[in-house]
Amino acid sequence: MKNRQWILTSKPMKLVTTDELELRTGEISEPGPGEVLLQLLFISLDPGQQVYMTSTQQNLPGGIVNVGDVVRAWAVGRVVASRSERFPVGSYARDLNGIAGVQEYATLHESTIVKVDPDQAPLPVHLSSLGMPGLTAYFGMLDIGRPREQETVVVSGASGAVGSVAGQVARIKGCRTVGIAGGATKCRYVVEELGFDACVDYRAPDFINALRQACPEGIDVYFDNVGGSVLDACLGHMSMRGRIAFCGAVADYGGSQPYAIRNYMAVLLKGLRWEGVNFYRYADQAPAAIAEMAGWIGAGQLRHREDIHAGLENFVTTFHKLFEGGNFGKLILQVHKDEDI
């Protein structure tokens, strides 16, 4: 058996392309004691992968992708060989730390994977609302944002994997929830399907004025997934002692020069709390969070949407959709089909 893998061949200076990546065919490692061989079915594509490929900081939480490494990624798959009593052949699992990689097969230790149940939710959902993006949204909103009933919560990237869950969590907690998304179609989805109270199109020429109209009493909690000018606009409209959960800066990931924030003095003048969201801080609390969110999904309170594209060979072009606004929902790459699902 052979294993196709996307390998980093050089560190990118901007949005990664096939100039820094190569699809290679390698050998499959047989599982050792306590290990399983996963046939990867679905791979999660996330903006953070760009950070892992670009960064040279070896102490980055979750690790980085060094030259010669398989590109990091969360994935869900089927066990096709096992030396673990906990994961028999035919069972399904998701990796816990985003190390499965952009490849067809992964040999992983039982301590780094968790069993998933296709009857609880379709397998791709275990990479979206019940996976890393959903957990990031859940903990970022509840532990850092700490929304209180009737407060105004604003979420950027509101139609995406993290933002859609973050806003729905705030809505479930009784907040007035305002989304920010790109284009009328996504804004309608955020309001009509996800149940946000309003959604503002950041591409519109009157974006800042529309944001103020949607939040007449200011923003109590801002969950930021994009950074850049959208973050700057929200900083300028925060309420006193507001909270900012800083989850991502997709607007800056593909460029060489970060956006220059102008409204940073609001942090000082309004006593804001601005804290980064790091999934790895909460990994040990994930099972309880997954159980609660699965209950919300079952009750129809938490909706999800996956944007699935087929073919490992299409990784680079599909990954670019994250930075072009081309995805609608959680972006996932389907590697293999499973006739049992």
Image (tube, helix red, strand yellow):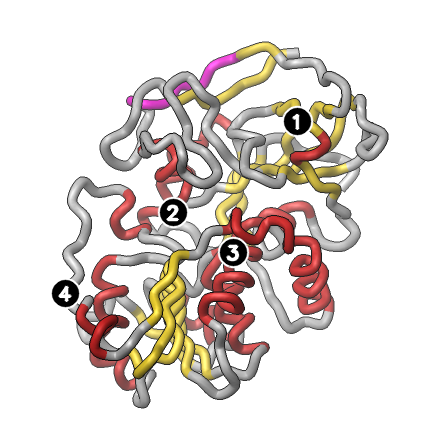
Is residue 185 in view? no
**Magenta residues?**
19-25
Q: Earlier in the sequence, mark 3 or mark 4?
A: 3
Give percent across and percent down for residue 109: 69, 27
Give the residue pinned by disc 2: 322
Q: Earlier in the sequence, mark 4 or mark 1?
A: 1
* The quadrant where residue 335 appears: top right
Give how far apart the Cα atoms at labels 2 and 4 are: 26 Å
Q: Earlier in the sequence, mark 2 or mark 4?
A: 4
Give the residue pinned by disc 3: 136
Give the residue pinned by disc 1: 108
Amino acid type indicated by mark 4? Arg
Amino acid type indicated by mark 3? Thr
Chief SS of the magenta region: strand
10 Å neighbourhood of mark 2: few (<14), some, or many (≥20)? some
Give how far apart the Cα atoms at labels 4 and 1 are: 45 Å
Give the residue pinned by disc 4: 262
Q: Earlier in the sequence, mark 3 or mark 1?
A: 1
Magenta run includes residue 24: yes
